Image (spheres, rainbow, N blue to C red):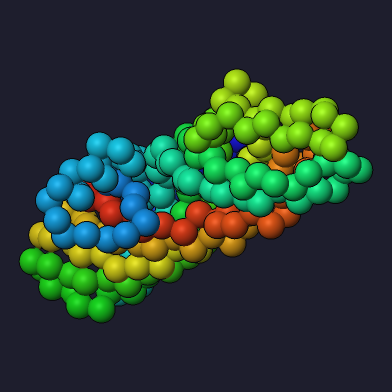
Amino acid sequence: MKKTILMIAAVLLMGGSVFAGEGLDISFGPKIGYQTTKLSYQKADIKAGFANNFTAGLFGRVSYGRFYVQPEIMYFRTEQLFSLNVHNVGEGWLPEENVNFTLNSTNLQVPVLFGYKILDYSIVSLRMQVGPTANFTLASKTLFDKTYTLTSSTGETIVLNNNQEAFDTKTIAWGIQAGLGVDILNRITLDINYNIGISKVFGANLINERWGEYIDVTNIDNTKQNMFMVTIGYKIR
């Protein structure tokens, strides 16, 4: 995965020399912003978004007329709340608990957006864009809202708490981004994209082997990453 990340960064930073002479407009630069599940224009909400769900990275753009391709590489952290109903799949276990937990993860997101400039003026331009995205999970941690003790009819117990690495997250989760962007003076960029998760956050072994044979968690809800990403960038070139 490290090789993939380095290759993407190299393309973003060296695109100008690669495409020189082809009549294309090449630009790249840094971006910062935040992720949120609900858009808001309130100052307090925006400030909280930057404080709790900050994201930063690089973008590149290859334009031809009003059409463009924009690859990005963005680093961010997320907190997602999940709940599941425990189903009895092991003999004698009692399905009496609803388990709530938060998944904290550090991610690297790589979208490739294909766009079109709806309005194109020297002072301001308005864009629309859509494209696939790959979300690489660099690290994750499961935090339960309390300690859960699941008991069988024979008195055997299973304990779920923050001291155990219970849940398996996928290394890569795929999605689609779509949104709008504004360029000011052909330098400052503002993008609001919505990420639609295609694949679930959790892997095939959602819960590790110690509990997997006893607990069926296939009904876990809200396992896809659906969120807005609001970013401000600066075109160096």
Q: What residue occupies the far left of the structure in this picture?
A: 123
Residue 16 percent coordinates (x, y): 35, 48
**Going 67% across and 37% down the picture, which residue do you hit?**
168
Q: Specify the quadrant of the image occupied by residue 182.
A: bottom left
- For the residue pair 19 and 176, the one nearer the viewer reads as 176
Q: Specify the quadrant of the image occupied by residue 164.
A: top right
Report the number of discs.
0
Question: Is residue 30 in sight in this rendering?
Answer: no
Check the image and report above or below for 181 versus 85: below
- For the residue pair 215 and 131, the one nearer the viewer reads as 215
Left or right, residue 24 beside residue 10: left
Q: Specify the quadrant of the image occupied by residue 92.
A: top right
**Going 20% across and 77% down the picture, which residue do you hit?**
119
Q: What residue occupies the far right of the structure in this picture?
A: 91
Residue 31 percent coordinates (x, y): 28, 45
Residue 98 percent coordinates (x, y): 62, 47
Left or right, residue 216 beside residue 197: right
Q: What residue occupies the far top of the structure in this picture?
A: 163
**Going 67% across and 31% down the picture, which residue do you hit?**
149
* Image quarter of the N terminus: top right
Check the image and report above or below for 107 versus 219: above
Residue 45 percent coordinates (x, y): 20, 50
Question: Is residue 131 in sight in this rendering?
Answer: yes
**Going 33% across and 41% down the picture, which residue do you hit?**
53
Left or right, residue 172 beside residue 216: left
